[in-house]
Amino acid sequence: MTLIGWIIAFSLVGGVLSVLAAASFLLIPESWRSRLLPAMVSFAIGALLGAAFLAVLPHALESPGLRDMHAITGTVLGGLLGFFLLEKLVLWRHCHADECETHAPDRRHSHTSAAGYLIVIGDGVHNFVDGVLIAAAFYTDIHLGVVTALAVAAHEIPQEVGDFAILLHSGFTRGKAFFYNMLSSLTTVIGGVLAYFFLGLAQSAVPYVLAVAASSFIYIAVADLIPGLHKRVDPRATFEQVMLIACGITVIALAHAALH
C-alpha cells in the first residue's frame, strides 16, 4: 500500500469508524452505557499518554537531522498552550457523558440549538488536526502511524458517544446527529491528505508536527479526561481507573513493540 493509502485508511479508522462505533454503542441499554463509558475513558487516557510518551515524542526527538531537542520540547509546550486557547474558544472541548457544562444546550430553543452546531464545528476542527497528526506519524514510520491512529480511535469513540448525546439533547434527531457527526469525521481524512502533500514539500516540519501530536494527546488526557475521573473517589473506582489506564498504556506499548 502507498503512503497516502495508509494515511487515508487510518484516518478513516480514527474518524469515520469511530463515529460508526459510537453510534452502535448508543444502541445498547443506557444502564450498560453508563458503566462502560467511564471505563472507555480511563482506557483512552492510558492509550493517549502511552502513545505520546512511548511512541510519538521519542520519534520526534530521534528525527534525523534534528539539531536542538529544546525546539521539540518547546513545541510541545507551545502546543499545550495552543490547545488551552482553542478550548477557551470552545473549539476543542469535548464531552464524554450525556451532560456537559461546556456544551450545555440552550433549553429555550427546542430544535438544533447553537450548542449543537458548536459541537459539530469543534469536532470538525479536532478531527482535522487528528488527520494532520496521523499523516505526520505515517511520514515518520508506518508503525508509528498505526499506533497514533489507534490512540486517536481510543479517544474518539467515547468522545463521539458524548457528542451524540449532547446533539440529541440539543434537539437533533438521531438521523441528523449521525449525519453531522459523520460529516465532521470526514475532516480527519481531509487533514491527513492535505498534510501528506504539505509534509512532502516540507519534511523538516515532521518532527515538529509530531511534537504537536504529543502535546495534543497529553492535553486531552490530562486536561479533558482525567478531571472527570476525580468525580468518583471511592477506592474501588480509583483502582478500576488505574488498572484501565495501565491497560491502555500496555496496549499501546505492546502494539508499538509488536509492529517493530
Image (tube, helix red, strand yellow):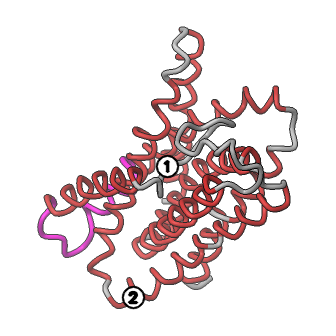
Give the number of the mark in front: 1 or 2: 1
- The single residue placed furthest to the front in the displayed view is 108
Q: Position of residue 199 (x, y in %)?
A: 38, 83
Write down the quadrant of residue 185 in the picture: bottom right
Residue type, numbered disc 2:
Gly
Instruction: Answer left or right for 183 relative to 132.
Output: right
Secondary structure under tag 1 reads loop
Q: Position of residue 49 (x, y in %)?
A: 43, 43
Do callouts 1 and 2 mark residues in contact (Cβ within 8 Å)?
Answer: no
Q: Report the Cα–Cα distance between label 1 and label 2.
A: 31 Å
Instruction: Answer left or right for 44 relative to 27.
Output: left
The residue wearing badge 2 is 200
Q: Nearer the viewer, residue 239 or 147?
A: 239
**Magenta-colored segment: predominant secondary structure:** helix
Is 28 above or below relative to 13? above
Earlier along the polypeptide chain: callout 1 or callout 2?
1
The residue wearing badge 1 is 93
Q: Which mark is residue 151?
A: none
Q: Which residues are magenta?
A: 52-69
Secondary structure under tag 2 reads helix
Instruction: Answer left or right for 172 relative to 68.
Output: right
Q: Position of residue 130 (x, y in %)?
A: 50, 64
Please name the residue shown 46% across and 30% down the image.
Answer: 227
Please name the residue shown 27% across and 55% down the image.
Answer: 76
Please name the residue shown 51% across and 61% down the image.
Answer: 126
Write down the quadrant of residue 111 in the picture: bottom right
Q: Nearer the viewer, residue 20 or 94?
A: 94
If the image is split into quadrants, where does the N terminus sit?
bottom right
Instruction: Answer left or right for 39 relative to 33.
Output: left
Q: Residues within 10 Å of mark 2 (few under 14, many from 20)?
A: some
Residue type, numbered disc 1:
Arg
